[in-house]
Image (cartoon, rainbow, N blue to C red):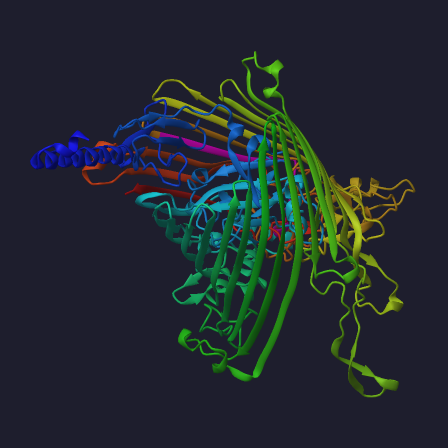
Amino acid sequence: MEFLHLPLKTKRLVRLLTTLFFFAYAQMAWAAHAPIRIAGKVTEATGQGLPGVTVQVKGTTTGTVTDGTGVYSIQADETATLVFSSIGFQTMEVAVGGRTAIDVTLVEDTKSLSEVVVVGYGTQRKSDVTGATVTIKGEELVKQPVLTATQALQGKAAGVQIISSGQPGTSPVIRIRGTSTALAGTAALFVVDGVLTDDISNINTADITNIDVLKDASATAIYGARGANGVVIITTKRGTVGKMTVNYSGNAGFRLPTNLVQMANAAEYANYVSTASGTVVSPGTTSTDWYGQILRTGFQQNHGLSVNGGTDKSTYFLSAGYFTDQGIVLNNVYKRFTLRANNDFTFNKFVKAGITASYSNGNNQIANLGSAYNNAYRAAPIIQSKVGNKYGNTSVYQNVGNPILDIDNNDNNEKDNRLLGSAYLELKPVEWLTLRSNMGGDWTNLNSRVYNYQFNNDTTTFINSGGNQRNPDSNLKFENTRTFHWTWDNLITFSKKVNKHAITALVGTTAEEYTQVKFSAYRKNVPATPSLWYIGTGNANTSTNDGTGDKYTRNSYISRLNYNFDDKYLFTATLRIDGSSRFPSQNRWGYFPSVGAGWLISNESFMQNQNVFDVFKLRASWGRVGNDRVPSDSYTVTVQPNLAYPFGGGIATPGSAITQIKDPNLKWETTEELDFGAEFSALNGRLTGEINYYDKKARDLLINVKVPSVTGDADGVVLTNAASIANTGLEVTLNWRGKISNDLSYRVGGNATLNKNNVIGLNGGQPILDGGVGANQQYTTRTDNGQPVGSFYVLQVLGVFQSDEEIANYKNTGGQAIQPTASPGDFRYQDTNGDGRIDDNDRVFVGSYQPKAYFGLNLGLTFKDLDFSVDFYGNVGNQVYNGKRGVRQNVLDNVERTMAYNRWTRSNASQTEPRANSGNLAPSTYFVESGSFARINNATLGYKLPTTWLNKVHVSSARVFVTAQNILTMKKFSGFTAELLSDSPTKQGIELNAYPTTQTYAIGLNVGF
């Protein structure tokens, strides 16, 4: 109360001081919680800066990532805690404590199984996964100068076989744990950011964060009808919180053919043909290397530019890429342009959304390789290739086309535009519940144009006239194919941990629809000027048109339960129910369950005092998946119109008839698989590994079954579910990482897969005869009981007859001469059934293209700012068929140099090479060769430029490198390559017109701003 009696000036002073005190207190209180700018550098134990480390303010959505040198900057409350995390390193929490400069050193995570991997419709810790999966980081894939990421995947994952081709614009074939079907689709399913697709040639490898391969039925069962051949999940890069960063990655180099087959030169050819024909052939003055005439050194380049950044409310990743591959064959080049935009939006702690969008434009100039390569093998070297604008006339000499003209006369171009994208909305009303809806679409528009120039077999085209290589009328064919595939996933995820019990449950639905519309138009006499290549400029009287299409839908219900007790005992169960329009209503729905269990032994109390294993896990699983990749009309009987029928023997009347009997009870192909595995990390993370054993059986596979001729079926067979195929195998993966000093470290990794493939039951189905190569070889493979799919089925060569006496003495048990018309130098074939003659009944199985084992070896070395890596790949135990030798059908056809020198003569008693002959040989073991090979797949040497240099030009990181692809291949096969693409497993492994293996040498640059 005394305050009331103070003088007025004193009162005012007290009020002012009080106000200032409270204002100062408020300022100090506000300052205590005001955000401050914190900067620093994140390094590893060697002192090397770590790029891409996530730095987040604990308990908030505020965060950033380190740049290419490990430097970061972030705003946070001075009492906050920063969380530093990066894959392969232990997460670290640091209290700010008012500091504005914080440098941290992350410790390598020796428990590699703690990494997060992508599984179907979600993620899990690697240690919690009970199925067989493998993860490959994008940084490993981008080192190689290849079109698609699957090519770079070769040799890096056990159980995954990649069959590549050097042909520009061609995607490799991927086989996961063997072949499990004969007639239905064999391709693995790709899932790109949640969108299901069969092709990833539109994806720029530099945009990929990682690839996760789901190998066993337990892991793939969540994809049901699409998971029978394995699943490859691709996650592309997303934006990160922090300032905008710009990155460029590119390389350029050249490609050249390797492992070329050496053909006989003019002198060698003349000697061989003179002997075979009995007529003297002059070598002349020309010796043409036909392969050398159509092959070249090609240029290759790949460039990518990306922009990345964002805030705690929205992030973005934008990229553009340009790829050019000039093939090693004349007139062959592929170009691709790509764009990508990935955006994520955080509205609040309850709602998130995002979009993923990519566009690609491809332009493929395709060489007429089928005709050119076949003719280059057969064309006589004594004929000139080309003089000025006139071609050597091989046709008038030996009825074989000039390979250069085959290419020059044909203009085959494909242009494709593709949009692939998705959008998601995610709600998280409470911490343990997530609702997510994802809509994805894949749209393609492919335009194909094939123009064949007009030319005559006269001296306007050829050096000399005659022969039958001519095209009297130019012709043009246009074909347009449009497809659209949409998917819509709606998922609910429950995740809760109570004491030692951790439960994650997923339920949801997914729907998809695929449509395809294709039409084509053809006319003759179209002008040769490219600007006039339109159907309307051709002769309307020669017009033909066609149109086809396809449409199918799927509807699915999915569920998965993951249970973890005390980080020791794991259990996973999934169920997917699929409905597919590709089957009749009574068989439309398929049920695909799986169960898996795991035991983290290293977390048991009795393992705590040992110093060998950091992590050791045993797991076992069983699952069932399906395959509905059959033609959409496989069960629907259709009527063929415009068939002529003469009533009463009179004039034929147009009509319609059912010419193909269909099975109205067609159903799913199903695959069941047992998998047992062990995963470990030992010796403080230096040694990691995984061992898997699998037993996979596919049942109810599609195969043709004979029907009585009275049914009226045109080919006498009906497609139905009858066959069964088994694959059993063992996979081993080992990786070692060592450090010699702070400046020098290394890594060694290897994987090997043993696989046995067998047809275990046709159940009334007919063996599939396939693999015809022409000439006298209508089929070379047979898919039958007890043999691998697509096994070679040929005559067994016992040797070469050395004399007339040997021929006369080669008899069956009944004393009958087996090959009485043979001559010395001819092959001696095995009379397998003992009937005294050689025919198709004497064929035997002699292996298949499917390898018994394949392997990969990956080495890496880092010294200060230098890095070096080299990858090896190979397979053993398979066979290939030298089909190009089999199509030799004229005495004037050229031969390989080894055939010319090693052939049987009276003075060269060969038992492996026959006498000089005119071709048309029967399919036999002579054409079957070992497909085993080992190759140095890639070697890369890189150097990171010092930061002291880069800071002067405001560049955060830069790395230059040189790389080489397919440096050396060690093989037994005498052909171009033992890696042979095929669209069918029943005829794979036959070399006819294989694109030669190519070597690539390139120099590249990675820059970050």
Instruction: State which quadrant residue 831 falls in.
Output: top right
Look at the image and say whether residue 350 sits in the magenta stretch.
no
Q: Quadrant of the C terminus?
A: top left
| Image: magenta residue range | 867-884
824 displayed left or right of 841: left
Can you give x and y, in whole percent of width and height, for residue 148 in the image?
48, 48
Can you give x and y, in whole percent of width and height, for residue 866 in the image?
33, 29
User: Which one is nearer the viewer's eye here, 385 or 712?
Assistant: 712
Q: Residue at x 34, y 38 (%)?
A: 961
Can you name the residue that lies furthest to the bottom here? 651
648 displayed left or right of 728: right
Residue 160 showing in the rendered view: yes
Q: How many marks?
A: 0
Give above or below for 268 relative to 86. below
346 displayed left or right of 902: left
Can you give x and y, in whole percent of width and height, for residue 416 in the image?
48, 63
Residue 802 showing in the rendered view: no
Instruction: State which quadrant residue 758 falls in.
Output: top right
Can you give x and y, in whole percent of width and height, for residue 232 in the image?
57, 45
Give above or below for 423 relative to 729. below
User: Which one is nearer the viewer's eye here, 137 or 363?
Assistant: 137
Q: Residue at x 49, y 71 (%)?
A: 451
